[in-house]
Amino acid sequence: MKEYEQAITKLNRSLEYKKDFLNTYLELGFANTKLKRNEEAIAQFKKAMEIDPKSHIPYNGIAEVYRDNIKDCDQAMEWYRKTLGVKTNERKANFGLGYCSNSKGEYSAAINYLKKAVEAETTYTAAFVELGFAYYKTGGFSDAEYHFNKAISLSPNNENARYYACLMYVQQKDKYKAQKMLDELKQLNSKHVEKLQPKVNAL
């Protein structure tokens, strides 16, 4: 329900009854992450690690704090690699490594990670979008198109897949396909339309 303050109050109360319950610390880490209380979130995830060093979840939790809140992809990737050390080919860690690799312009590396993410979960929409983006940036346009379409089939209202596909079609000077993506974004009342419209008009 996204009532994170209330969640923290209840979770702290639960610790009065049981100090070593793994899920309490994981939930505290998650709630603090959402509230951008980064140091507290990391501290709670580290407590979870002490209780169960073999759980991959707190490693992912810390990685996401660095990726989404602190915007430090290098630190995030370090923690995602620690996740893979605990659980080989874990889907979220591979996605995170792929996402960060894309952010750093390391598209070939991103492809390797993201392929593992979609192999682990064949309905992982965000991973299909990122994989399509990585292929697009490396010139693998047919692979990119396939993965963007896959993301749209999984999530019919997905804007990012259409946005990147439209940019790709603009680069290919394919006005018909670019306009089709733009029209679909208009139907979704997407904020991307304003940026894309001049690019499509110029074709």
Image: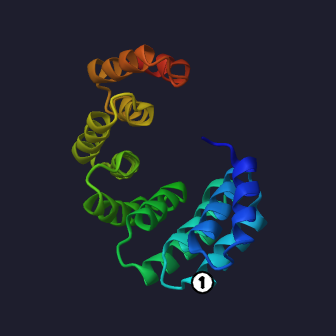
Residue 202 in sight from this viewpoint: no
Colour setup of the view: rainbow
Kindly identify the amino acid type of the residue bearing the numbered disc 1.
Answer: Ile
Near mark 1 (Cα within 10 A), the count class, few <14, some 14-19 or many ≥20, is some
Residue 163 in sight from this viewpoint: yes
Q: Quadrant of residue 168?
A: top left
Q: Position of residue 4 (x, y in %)?
A: 70, 48
Quadrant location of the N terminus in the rendered image: top right
Q: Is residue 20 left or right of residue 90?
A: right
Q: Position of residue 46 (x, y in %)?
A: 66, 78
Number of marks in picture = 1
Quadrant location of the C terminus in the rendered image: top left
Q: Quadrant of residue 181?
A: top left
Nearest the viewer among 107 and 42 is 42
Q: Please name the residue shown 29% across and 63% down the image.
A: 120
Nearest the viewer among 66 and 147 is 66
Q: What residue is disc 1 on?
A: 51
Q: Please name the residue shown 69% across and 65% down the image.
A: 14
Q: Please name the residue shown 63% across and 42% down the image.
A: 2
Position of residue 67 relative to residue 163, above or below, is: below
Where disc 1 sits, the SS reads helix
Q: Is residue 123 left or right of residue 188?
A: left
Q: Is residue 123 left or right of residue 68?
A: left
Q: Quadrant of residue 194?
A: top right
Nearest the viewer among 72 and 195 is 72
Q: Position of residue 178 (x, y in %)?
A: 34, 23
Q: Please name the residue shown 33% across and 66% down the image.
A: 112
